[in-house]
Image (spheres, helix red, strand yellow):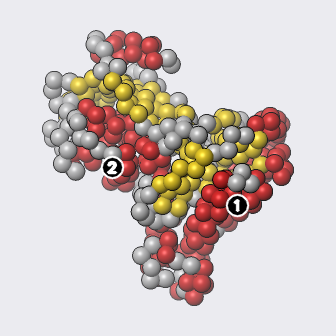
């Protein structure tokens, strides 16, 4: 929807104009999966797909929220009392952000809000982080809190951990807040330092969404995190970031199989991220391909977060691209999307192969997007 018709919709609902717009993107992770909550390294980039929220401050202390995607529904709550979950699932993300800002002692204000988003939902491209960061940007601006992108991202993560019950790491919110056009962001999830890494001009990022319906994602996700923490504690390190393969092998006899495998994934994945940064800087497709292939295998066999549909898509795209592409699953797993890095001319090969084979094998249609690395959070007065 264009900015003009989005504004008109706001006026139609609230009988007055919006004062500002907050825009926060979804992300695709190039490599470094499930390493963030183990204090490790990740290499995502923000996308041009984004969640936009128009707002206007209210005279009272109510937050009223409508979404273009759920026209019959709206949510409404007061920032005065306790903020608790309501009936609307998407409205709860707004409540979650209000809850953590308030808990941190920030003085909030009442708001009229209208949400629009083109981040594909349920695809592992972080539509929820985009919503949290976009909303955080609004409280920051409307209530003049002067928070940094990093502080907004940390609050977004707290909203997810403490209100939405998903024990996610910091990757999605931090890249949504601080992403940079044309760049991936290497993050050290322990220090939260970031380094932007330019994506070579001739490299395309193709995202293929399996459209496999994700189930039990949060409980499986949280269990993986528990396994990782147990493994770290059995190796007497504070997080898997500090563990080596030697530590892991020495502790093997006191670990469950799952703890061993989860830790093996994380320790090896951290190395792959740092090597991938060099490969990206040198536009070295051969190394990128090896690293992304190894990452996918590790997510399949050790971390066990892939499904036949995402494994199948990876195989289809790897075969279509041959030596000219690097492919792996991306995001939280259990369905969702895969990511391919390839030259522009080879995008057609992915499209052809997916169209010819995926539905025939899995009886679902995939969606293909050519992603562009975009900027992080932007809040502008209208
Ligand atoms: C989800 C979480 C992130 C990260 C990824 C897996 O996207 O929100 O914090 O753990 O899964 O890498």
Q: Is mark 2 within 8 Å of ligand 1?
A: no
Which residue: 36% across, 17% down? 10
Q: Secondary structure at mark 1?
A: helix
Can residue 268 be spotted in the picture? yes
Which residue: 53% across, 30% down? 118
Task: Tell me how far mark 2 sits from mark 1, CA to CA.
Answer: 32 Å
Label 2: how many Cα within 10 Å (few below 14, some 14–19, many 20+): some
Which residue: 60% across, 63% down? 274
Residue 4 on image: x %, y %: 44, 13
Nearer the observer, 13 or 191:
191
Which residue: 33% across, 46% down? 148
Can residue 225 be spotted in the picture? no
Q: Quadrant of residue 253?
A: bottom right
The image's mark for residue 44 is: none
Residue 67 on image: x %, y %: 40, 26
Label 1: how many Cα within 10 Å (few below 14, some 14–19, many 20+): many
Residue 233 on image: x %, y %: 44, 79
Q: Left or right of 362: which side holds 123?
A: left
N-term mark: 2 or 1: 2
Q: Secondary structure at mark 2?
A: helix
Q: Is residue 26 above or below residue 381?
A: below
Q: Quadrant of residue 161?
A: bottom left
Q: Is residue 213 above or below residue 261?
A: above
Q: Quadrant of residue 268?
A: bottom right
Quadrant of the rendering where the C terminus is positioned: top left
Q: Left or right of 261: which side holds 310?
A: right
Q: Which residue is mark 1?
A: 291
The image's mark for residue 151 is: 2
Q: Is residue 317 above or below residue 69?
A: below
Q: Left or right of 275: which side holds 377?
A: left
């Amino acid at each position: 929807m264009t900015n003009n018709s989005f504004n008109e919709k706001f006026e139609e609902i609230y009988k007055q104009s919006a004062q500002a717009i907050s825009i926060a993107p979804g992300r695709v992770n190039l490599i470094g999966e499930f390493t963030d909550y183990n204090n490790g390294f990740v290499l995502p980039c923000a996308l041009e797909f984004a969640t936009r929220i128009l707002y206007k401050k209210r005279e009272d202390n109510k937050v009223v929220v409508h979404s273009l995607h759920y026209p019959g529904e709206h949510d409404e709550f007061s920032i005065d009392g306790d903020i608790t979950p309501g009936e609307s699932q998407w409205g709860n993300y707004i409540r979650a952000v209000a809850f953590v800002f308030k808990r941190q002692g920030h003085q909030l204000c009442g708001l009229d809000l209208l949400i629009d988003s083109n981040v594909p939902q349920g695809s592992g491209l972080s539509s929820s982080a985009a919503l949290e960061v976009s909303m955080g940007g609004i409280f920051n601006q409307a209530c003049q809190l002067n928070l940094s992108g990093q502080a907004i991202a940390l609050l977004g993560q707290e909203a997810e951990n403490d209100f939405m019950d998903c024990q996610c790491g910091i990757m999605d919110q931090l890249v949504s807040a601080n992403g940079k056009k044309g760049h991936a962001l290497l993050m050290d999830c322990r220090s939260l330092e970031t380094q932007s890494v330019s994506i070579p001009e001739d490299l395309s990022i193709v995202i293929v969404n399996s459209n496999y319906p994700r189930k039990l994602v949060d409980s499986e996700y949280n269990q993986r995190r528990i396994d990782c923490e147990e493994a770290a504690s059995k190796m007497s390190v504070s997080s898997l970031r500090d563990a080596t393969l030697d530590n892991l092998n020495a502790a093997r006899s006191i670990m469950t199989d799952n703890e061993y495998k989860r830790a093996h994934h994380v320790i090896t994945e951290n190395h792959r991220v740092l090597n991938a940064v060099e490969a990206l800087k040198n536009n070295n497709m051969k190394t990128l391909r090896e690293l992304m292939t190894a990452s996918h295998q590790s997510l399949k066999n050790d971390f066990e977060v892939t499904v036949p549909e995402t494994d199948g898509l990876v195989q289809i795209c790897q075969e279509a691209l041959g030596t000219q592409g690097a492919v792996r699953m991306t995001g939280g797993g259990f369905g969702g999307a895969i990511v391919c890095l390839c030259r522009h001319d080879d995008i057609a090969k992915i499209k052809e192969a997916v169209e010819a084979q995926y539905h025939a094998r899995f009886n679902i249609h995939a969606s293909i997007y050519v992603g562009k690395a975009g900027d992080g959070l932007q809040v502008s007065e209208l």
